[in-house]
Image: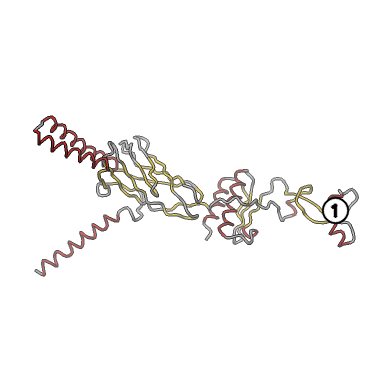
Amino acid sequence: MDTIARGAGPGIATRVRHWSRSLMRGRQPEPLPVRLDSHRIYIVPTRAGLGFTVLLAAMLVGALNYQNNAALLLTCMLGAALASSMLLTWRELHDLNLRSLHADHGFCGARVPLHLAFADDRQPRHGLRISIDKLEQPCPLQPGNSLATVTVPTERRGWMALPRMQVSSTLPFGLFRAWSWITPAGHMLVYPRILRDARPRERHDDPNDRIAGGDEFANLRNYRPGDPIRHVAWKASARHDHLLVREFDRAAPGQPLRFDWNALTGVERETRISRLTSWVCDAYAAAHPWILVLEDRRPIGPASDAAHYHRCLSALAELP
């Protein structure tokens, strides 16, 4: 008896481990490509399917009770249609092969497009749906076109693990629902949230980058005949016993803007990151060159192209 028990023990333990792994399938990240075989697909009747089954049972009882061959034939034909619809629903997901995916660049707080590339098996899958974060999105596939796009919610900046996706279908009649889970291994970079609550300081500290005649105060100098009276600094002149004139300048045309992390003193960290992100986006939209100076005083730029734009936003997103 002990020998039999010892011999049966490993078999039961193996079956339990296999059963637990099957329950966890789709929860652990898995490398691509991912193929949905018969062991990964679940199928249950919908509410309409349950109602149709009850109706068939009532028809069967009535046909047998009254010995009505026509009613019995109709019941059998509808039952065959019910069984066929279950097979067709299951086939919508069977052998679906996710080959690759990539995410677009997106900002925190927005839904980022995620592009999926499936293997083209020449089988139309009109009822395919992909659910992410309880939002079900239709993604029908056609022969020769095996690409689909879904959107992913983002809640924080930086690197984010790719979300768990539920692939489902209820075609052809909505009597059954088949579904499976895919959790692709990988990460996507989310840019910081855009915060447009302040304008950047356009003044350049380098005097070589300034030209006279602007509207930004530069310094005070002694009065010279011909200077406008409205530029006289009367309070400063009273303290120095001679006339002083305010001198104004502006940035020279084409000089890059400077977005300095350390210039935003007294601002909360995430607010500072979001503000710099907004300035970078505005400068890129205006095609104006800019320099981004990070927390460690490391400058990025100057430039105004798309590569510089994504380089700056990536650096801000990856800040600790």
Disc 1 is placed on an element classified as loop
Residue 160 rendering spot, x and y as whole percentages: 45, 54
Q: Is residue 62 above or below residue 270?
A: above
The residue type indicated by label 1 comes to Val
Q: Nearer the viewer, residue 104 or 274?
A: 274
Relative to residue 182, is residue 108 drawn left or right? right
Relative to residue 243, is residue 68 drawn left or right? left
Of the 4 image quadrants, the one containing the N terminus is: bottom left
Relative to residue 39, is residue 137 drawn left or right? right
Q: In the image as oriented, which residue stretches furthest toward the top?
A: 70
Residue 269 rendering spot, x and y as whole percentages: 57, 60
Q: Is residue 89 above or below residue 300?
A: above
How many numbered marks does the figure carry?
Answer: 1
Residue 104 rendering spot, x and y as whole percentages: 47, 46
Residue 67 rendering spot, x and y as whole percentages: 8, 33
Relative to residue 54, is residue 218 drawn left or right? right
Q: How is the image coloured?
A: secondary structure
Q: In the image as oriented, which residue stretches furthest toward the bottom?
A: 2
**In the image, what residue occupies the spot 88% across and 54% down?**
223
Crowd band around label 1 with a 10 angstrom C-alpha radius: few (<14), some (14–19), many (20+): some
**In the image, what residue occupies the spot 72% across and 55% down?**
206
**In the image, what residue occupies the spot 57% across and 54% down?**
274
Residue on which the image places disc 1: 232
